[in-house]
Amino acid sequence: MSDLQIGLIVLGVLLILLVLGFNWWQDRRVRRRMQEHFPASEQDPLLGAGETPAPAAADAARPRREPGIGQAAAPAAFQAEAPAAPEADDRDEPDPAVEVVIEIHFAEPARGADLLPYMQSLRQVGKKQLRVFASTDRGRHRSRIAAEESYSTLQLAVLLANRSGPLTAIEWSQAWARAQDLADRFEGSIEGPDQQAVLEQAARLDDVCAALDTQVGLTLMLGGAQPAAEVLTVARGMGFAPDGARLAWLNDTGAVRFTLARGDGAAFDAGMGGIERLHLLLDVPCSPADPHAFGRMVEVGRDLAGRLRAELVDDQGRPLADGAEKVIDERLQVLFEQLEQAGLRAGSERAQRVFA
């Protein structure tokens, strides 16, 4: 083989290698461009239809929302779960004007079901009312204990004074002892004001109440015993409503203006005995303020006396003088104003609590 033939063969091989190299380079260039448009992923980008979209394409996969009124909110499937409405606190709470609080702190929340058996002993000490309040383990204020809740603290609100007099040292000690007993049972601690300060506050409140405490009464003399059932029927027919052993005359909101009671103190439906006297009573601090409070009771009393053939007399047993109701109503207006200024508005829950 001549040198020319060998040279031609080598040149052909080189040309073939050059073509193969050019094709390889062209193929690599095309692949690089495709990768730039279709980033590497676990799925073939050309097979994405009907499959779960890649994270980068999640926004495009969301359902299209047509424009319209009231569609500002995102679709329900993509909204965060709305938080539950917060539990409301109870409105009733201790009254610092007429009550003093002993607080019990529990080391661990106490179940309401475990506390309930002890609530019966926390209603009264001596002649003073006790009220129980609590804070749940979720920080909500409660005015009563519920079996299904748990509580981190209890508050015992002790009434400072009522018509039995000011809170005494014995009554305060009883309240403190009951709080301590509850704390011991549920691994808690108690906190409260100094006894001497409490007794001084109670004495001041009692002085104020004593100066403002007024009741005005009238008596119906029936002249002879009348059947209780007949008297009750007449009184109910006039508009008196049951109120324990008494009957009550109510205002438009259901508040007691004045009461009617048997002279012997028994309930109207107690036995078959006759009734000889009836008492009408206007309890001024416990009745809503009224410019004609006494006059209204006199008017009803005279009507009732006429129906029962009775005589209406004052609390001294004397016939009621003409015009007396106007004079007494003027005096009562001054008293209503004094009660308001003292923070003991007539007929309010606070007034009914301390004038009980």
Image: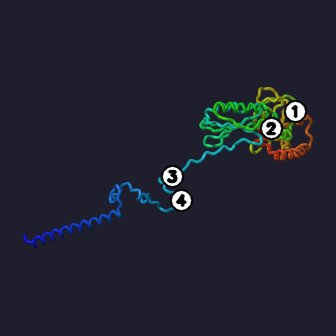
In this rendered view, identify the residue nearer to me: 223 or 79: 79
In this rendered view, identify the residue nearer to me: 18 or 111: 18
Where does residue 251 sit, x and y in percent of width and height? 77, 43
Q: Earlier in the sequence, mark 2 or mark 3?
A: 3
Q: Which mark is residue 221?
A: 1
Q: Earlier in the sequence, mark 3 or mark 4?
A: 4
**Residue identifier under label 3:** 80
Q: Which is more foreground, mark 2 or mark 4?
A: 2
Q: Quadrant of residue 325?
A: top right
Distance CA(mark 3)–CA(mark 4): 19 Å
Q: Amino acid at mark 2?
A: Ala
**Residue identifier under label 2:** 202
Q: Secondary structure at mark 3?
A: loop
Q: Residue at x 68, y 44 (%)?
A: 91
Q: Earlier in the sequence, mark 1 or mark 2?
A: 2
Where does residue 196 sit, x and y in percent of width and height? 79, 36
The vertical placement of 333 against 241, above or below, is below
Q: Are marks 2 and 3 in contact (CB under 8 Å)?
A: no
Distance CA(mark 2)–CA(mark 4): 61 Å
- Can I make out residue 196 in this image? yes
Residue farthest to the bottom, as pictured: 4
Distance CA(mark 3)–CA(mark 1): 76 Å
Q: Secondary structure at mark 4?
A: loop
Q: Earlier in the sequence, mark 3 or mark 1?
A: 3
Q: Quadrant of residue 204?
A: top right
- Can I make out residue 250 in this image? no
Q: Is residue 248 left or right of residue 149?
A: right
Distance CA(mark 1)–CA(mark 2): 40 Å
Q: Earlier in the sequence, mark 1 or mark 4?
A: 4
Q: Which is more foreground, mark 3 or mark 1?
A: 3
Q: Which is more foreground, mark 3 or mark 4?
A: 3
Q: Which is more foreground, mark 1 or mark 2?
A: 2
